[in-house]
Image (cartoon, rainbow, N blue to C red):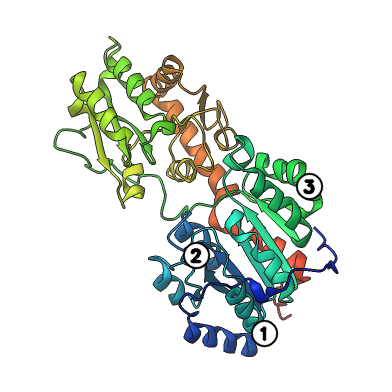
């Protein structure tokens, strides 16, 4: 994990890179961040993001910062566009948030970013995904010594959604990146094989989940849903996420309808909870209503109390046809739930078949129904797999575990050493 050597290359003149003149940078925040640079001894990490309202940054970025030692690293977040709803929470944790006010999505405000970098002089810049990658060039020109780039979303590697332009951009800027971070093994392999990153300069760091907020139920399940939906003895199948055609919720509804129509007595305990909104929600509700199963299902749309709703479930199912990165699976596992998921994308890395859940092919109603039936009829297996899933999250996907891995990358690049524990007096 050694940093690459600096590259003495000729780059385009910055003078022509800022043709438009949108609103100015937030100079008050910039001045405060700059004064902090001069006073503090800890290293400054500048995180460049498209917007704080995107990509689950409330979880991924704020919680990462919370779990990194502030005596060794300080953080400033630079947003290309509007900050979003999480700015206040970040400022409460001593994180400066600057906005470059970029109007056009997908375009980088080169000159404004260059000036911010020259003013703040961060020790390390951390960019994310294709929208932030061109900032690696600006950071090199501004003299930022250490540069990290993270790729999130396995769909980039697995389904060819990267265009020729974006792939070429990654290959051209690859030498400027000291270290890459991938959130899955397939994406790590893609960075090495398709983009040309040296294996020693790529680390896989899985997503983290707040295992304190998402925890197993401590007593009876909460009485969620409409009247009569929950009662003693029910077995709740749940799913969480946007309901579009690629999410496969119609397959889950079909499997649910087949199970409750079967003569097995255990299947009469089944309830279905689909949390999320999208174009497929109406179709799923119509399927349930046509079968007369409306009272046994609850589709409330998008909700803000997902942690509580997960604790009301007995089994989590993710029937997606493709999967970029499933925080929903991690949240369910942290909640002590066994998981039935389709064998696509990162699902195959998170769900250990026969140990924490069951993997099934996408669009296979029969096998999906059989997997759900197994957990419904054998509650001991559900409890056993759910406990193992929780343990797996604590070991590999908790916020402290994720922060530990990021800290190792930052320390290796900067040459920092963890402080020695204080010696005990004799």
- In the rendered structure, the answer to whether residue 233 lies left or right of residue 382 reads left
Q: Residues within 10 Å of mark 1 (few under 14, many from 20)?
A: few
Q: Is residue 188 above or below residue 176?
A: above
Q: Residues within 10 Å of mark 2 (few under 14, many from 20)?
A: some
Q: Is residue 410 visible?
A: no
- The residue carrying mark 2 is 62
The correct choice, above or below, for 376 with respect to 85 in the image is: above
Name the residue located 24 percent from the left edge and 29 percent from the top edge. Answer: 285
Tell me if residue 214 can be seen. yes
Q: Secondary structure at mark 3?
A: loop
CB atoms of marks 2 and 3 within 8 Å = no
Q: Residue at x 61, y 54 (%)?
A: 130
Judging by the rendered image, the residue that carries numbered circle 3 is 196
Does label 1 or label 3 sit earlier along the sequence? 1
Q: Marks 3 and 1: in contact by CB < 8 Å? A: no
User: Which is more foreground, mark 2 or mark 3?
Assistant: 3
Question: Please, is residue 114 above or below residue 170 in the view?
Answer: below
Q: Position of residue 251 (x, y in %)?
A: 38, 23
Where residue 270 appears, x then y in whole percent?
Answer: 28, 25
Query: Going by the picture, which residue comes out furthest to the top?
Result: 263
In the rendered picture of this protein, how many numbered marks are placed on residues?
A: 3
Viewer-side residue, 323 vs 22: 22
The residue beneath circle 1 is 41
Q: Position of residue 167 (x, y in %)?
A: 68, 47
Residue at the image point whose x is 36% and y is 42% from the top: 310
Q: Tag 3 or tag 2, which sits nearer the N-term? A: 2
Return the disc, 1 or 2, that comes first in the chain's sequence: 1
Q: Could you tell me how far apart the alpha carbons at marks 1 and 3 are, in whole angstroms?
A: 35 Å
């Amino acid at each position: 994990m050694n940093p690459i050597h600096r590259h003495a290359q000729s780059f385009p003149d910055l003078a022509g890179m800022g043709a438009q003149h949108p609103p100015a940078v937030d100079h008050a925040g910039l001045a405060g961040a700059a004064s902090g640079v001069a006073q503090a001894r800890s290293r400054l990490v500048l995180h460049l993001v498209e917007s704080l309202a995107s990509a689950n940054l409330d979880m991924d970025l704020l919680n990462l910062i919370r779990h990194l030692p502030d005596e060794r690293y300080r953080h400033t977040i630079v947003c290309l566009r509007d900050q979003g709803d999480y700015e206040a929470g970040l400022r409460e944790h001593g994180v400066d948030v600057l906005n470059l006010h970029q109007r056009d999505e997908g375009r980088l405000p080169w000159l404004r970013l260059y000036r911010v970098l020259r003013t703040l002089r961060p020790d390390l810049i951390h960019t994310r995904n294709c929208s932030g990658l061109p900032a690696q060039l600006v950071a090199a020109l501004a003299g930022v010594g250490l540069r990290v780039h993270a790729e999130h979303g396995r769909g980039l590697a697995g389904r060819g959604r990267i265009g020729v332009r974006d792939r070429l951009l990654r290959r051209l800027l690859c030498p400027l990146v000291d270290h890459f971070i991938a959130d899955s093994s397939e994406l790590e392999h893609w960075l090495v094989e398709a983009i040309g990153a040296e294996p020693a300069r790529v680390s896989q760091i899985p997503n983290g989940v707040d295992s304190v907020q998402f925890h197993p139920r401590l007593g009876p399940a909460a009485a969620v849903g409409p009247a009569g939906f929950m009662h003693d003895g029910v077995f709740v199948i749940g799913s969480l996420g946007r309901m579009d055609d690629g999410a496969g919720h119609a397959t889950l509804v079909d499997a649910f309808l087949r199970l409750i129509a079967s003569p097995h007595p255990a299947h009469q305990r089944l309830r279905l909870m689909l949390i999320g909104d999208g174009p497929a929600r109406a179709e799923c509700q119509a399927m349930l209503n046509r079968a007369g199963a409306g009272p046994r299902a609850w589709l409330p749309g998008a909700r803000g109390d997902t942690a509580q709703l997960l604790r009301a479930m007995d089994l989590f199912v993710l029937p997606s046809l493709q999967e970029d990165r499933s925080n929903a699976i991690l949240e369910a596992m942290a909640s002590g739930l066994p998981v039935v998921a389709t064998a696509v994308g990162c699902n195959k890395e998170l769900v250990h078949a026969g140990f924490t859940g069951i993997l099934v092919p996408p669009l296979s109603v029969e096998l999906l129904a059989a997997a759900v039936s197994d957990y419904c009829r054998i509650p001991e297996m559900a409890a056993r797999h759910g406990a193992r899933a929780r343990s797996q999250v604590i070991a590999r996907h908790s916020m402290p575990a994720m922060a530990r891995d990021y800290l190792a990358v930052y320390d290796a690049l900067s040459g920092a050493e963890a402080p020695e524990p204080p010696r005990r007096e004799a």
